[in-house]
Image (cartoon, rainbow, N blue to C red):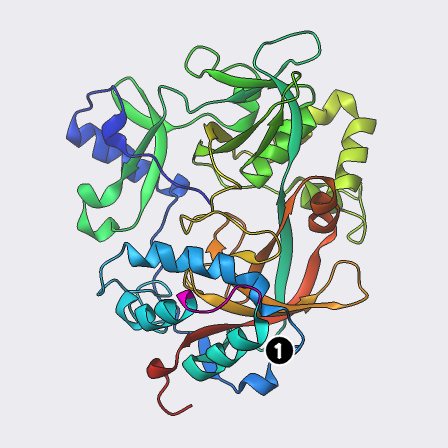
Amino acid sequence: MFAARNVSKTRFSIKPVVLLAGMIALAACETGKTPAPDTATTYTPVAFDTLPGWDADALAEALPAWRQSCSRMASQPDGKNIGPGSGNVAGTVADWRPVCAGLADLAAGDSAALRGFIEANLVPLRVQGKTDDPGLFTGYFEPIIEASRERTPIYHEPIYALPRDHVSVRLEAFDPALKGRSVVGRVEGGRLVPYRQRGEIEAGAINQTADVLFWARDILDVFILQVQGSGIAALPDGTRTRIGFAGHNGHNYGSVGRWLIERGELSAGRAGWEDIRAWLEANPKIMRDTLAVNRRFIFFREIDGDGPTGAAGVTLTAERSMAVDPKHVPLNVPVWLDAEHPDGEQRLQRLMLAQDTGNAIRGAVRGDFYWGTGRNALDKAGRMKSRGAYYILVPRALVPLS
């Protein structure tokens, strides 16, 4: 979900020795790691008839999302490793070309045909970590917030573009041992230092270095936009503009909900976004200080398209796209999900596509379910904290003994 900006775009000229020293000092703020394979993660072949709910899903609903991932793979070289990480569990792009070619020939809406195709050409691998404990699945969504291009007494909370002093550096250019790592910061006195934290930014630290894309009505709307990483600005003239991720300040995500639970302000069972929002609105004098518990800050840009773009480089599909930890699950591959539904009356048992990542999505069996746009999506995403399991589907040729 988060992409680093290349340092070559900065306007500063920095002495290499000083810059390298600054980057080493920023090791605690690094982001954008290229994941390495985790030997503690196992991938066990299973039969399709053992997948919970396999025969009941309307599989064809996932076909458009899957074809998007295939289009993404089509632009990549045959030898590109799919992953996860630098492993080869899911093979290479060449291994997926026959699968994607077959998907292109299937009729839209024909779940039976897609089911037969999948069973003939792919194998489910159950993903497990160090223990067989159930995994954790949360939800996210695309918020719609009221905003204006002009500041007014009603619209007064800034949504910032990427600041002009924002620097992102890939450390591999300076030391091959740091391959896959990057740091975010700013230049001060000829040295690269950590970028401003949320509290500093909210206090006006970047007013002279960052343009304001939009002005929102409500600071809490801006905060949830930050947490989700993208959204839609509903303007006073009735038009809508999609806002996408442009960069971040290099600091780790901090959970306001967890912070409130630890201090006894909320109970673990009642700490969804609506509960958090109600508490914040009831405590306006300490609202901003509480939000500053999350030091991470997101910058935005206006984007085109029918939906938010995930880390896999494709438009996310409501209820069929999922964020994963790419150290354990490769991007753009199909995933069979079996998890508790936030409504509690049924289970989420369906074909998903691994098309996004998230700063808080870490672990062998850890996913973030994309619910879509607007209020209904917020309701489900805000209540979802489910236990479950998932299986990646890989070309049958990669698992010859299955």
Above or below 355: residue 12: above
Residue 238 x %, y %: 66, 21
- Left/right placement of residue 364 relative to residue 339 reads left
- Crowding at mark 1 (Cα within 10 Å: few <14, some 14-19, many 20+): some
Above or below 212: residue 395: below
Please tell me which residue is depicted at 48% across the width and 38% down the height of the picture.
Answer: 305
Identify the residue at the far bottom of this view: 401
Please tell me which residue is depicted at 45% across the width and 15% down the height of the picture.
Answer: 211
Assign the magenta stretch its main secondary structure: loop
Q: Quick one: 51 or 161, which is closer to the camera?
A: 51
- Residue pointed to by mark 1: 54
Question: Where, by quadrant of the figure, is residue 123 drawn?
Answer: bottom left
Q: Which residues are magenta?
A: 104-109
- Left/right placement of residue 397 relative to residue 271 reads left
Kind of residue at badge 1:
Trp
Q: Can residue 142 be found in the magenta stretch?
A: no
